[in-house]
Image (cartoon, helix red, strand yellow):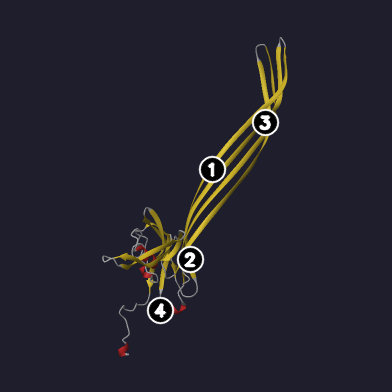
Amino acid sequence: MESETSYSSSKGDGQGSSKAVTISAGAYISFQVGDKWTFAETEASATYGFTYEYAESSTMETTVTYATQAGQDTVVFYSIPVEVYYYDIYYPEIDSSGNIVYKQGTTTVNIPHTAAVKTISLEKYEKIAKDYPTLLAISGNVLKSTPGDPSSYPQTAFGLDNAIVFNGDWSGVDYGSGSTSQEISITKETEESYTHTVSIEFKAGGGLKEETPVYNFEVSTGVVGGVETEIGTAKITSVGSTYSGTICDLPSEAEPYGYYFAWKLLTYTIEVDGANIPVVTYMVTDVTAPPELPDDFAQDYSQT
């Protein structure tokens, strides 16, 4: 009874920011000389710079898990629970002879509760579904297996929508207190980022200049520098699903009878009103068991 099947759904949101600042500084010298018809010039500069970067991010993830133990198929059901009270009431009425007679009627009082997600047994769900045509019939339609009967579970994923099978070796049952767990985990993450850059450069200096009838002479010196700032933001969104199953070994007392089966975790989807609803179950193969008793097997006590 410690065997368990579970489904988890997770959703995460995060944000990040980054900043980078680059500063550079240096010096230059420019020289020009020539006569009335020609001239030559040269310029040299040296700069030094450094960059400072800073980034931070934060993410929050929430997870909800629904599970059921061996022996029961369970439905995760979103509903608004309502308490309904029925009252018999008697009210007066005048008949055709002018006499007052009391007739009986029924009135109801509905007390709704907060809408919530709850796990209910498949049997209870089927009772509710009979009164609501919009609810999907699960037993014999979506789930054709019978808890406790390994041979009733599917042997392949053929014909199932969006089927995902555990990508590993088959797990076989043995006898004792051991157990085996399989898990399928799917995560989708998206990130949107934006970067803004501002750059400022400057150059300042001065020098000497001399002009004669024969030649011209000019020299200048100064400093160069610049500042560049980069600011970025990011938005992170993640959505994930985890499917898991744990099967315990059979009791040691059952070993002489030859029970055995091998299994893999299986998940697929069914479409209900345009939405894909996940189903978590098992693929089972190589089932062996002693013969079952006939359905009409009984003891005749009168002949005993």
Q: CA distance from mark 2 to mark 3?
A: 64 Å
Judge the density around disc 3: few (<14), some (14-19), many (≥20) Cα neighbours within 10 Å: some
> What's the amino acid at mark 2?
Ser
Q: CA distance from mark 1 to mark 2?
A: 39 Å
State which tag comes first along the sequence, 1 or 2: 2
> What's the amino acid at mark 1?
Ser
Q: CA distance from mark 4 to mark 1?
A: 63 Å
Judge the density around disc 1: few (<14), some (14-19), many (≥20) Cα neighbours within 10 Å: few
> What's the amino acid at mark 4?
Tyr
Check contact, mark 1 vs mark 2: CB within 8 A: no
State which tag comes first along the sequence, 2 or 4: 2
At x 58% / y 48%, what residue is drawn? 57
Tag on residue 181?
2
Q: Which residue is mark 4?
A: 257
State which tag comes first along the sequence, 4 or 1: 1
- Secondary structure at numbered mark 3: strand
Q: Which residue is mark 1?
A: 193
Q: Going by the image, does 26 lie left or right of 287? A: right
Tag on residue 225?
3
Judge the density around disc 2: few (<14), some (14-19), many (≥20) Cα neighbours within 10 Å: some
Between 83 and 180, the residue placed more toward the observer is 83
Q: Can the viewer see residue 106?
A: yes
> Mark 4 or mark 1: which is in front?
1
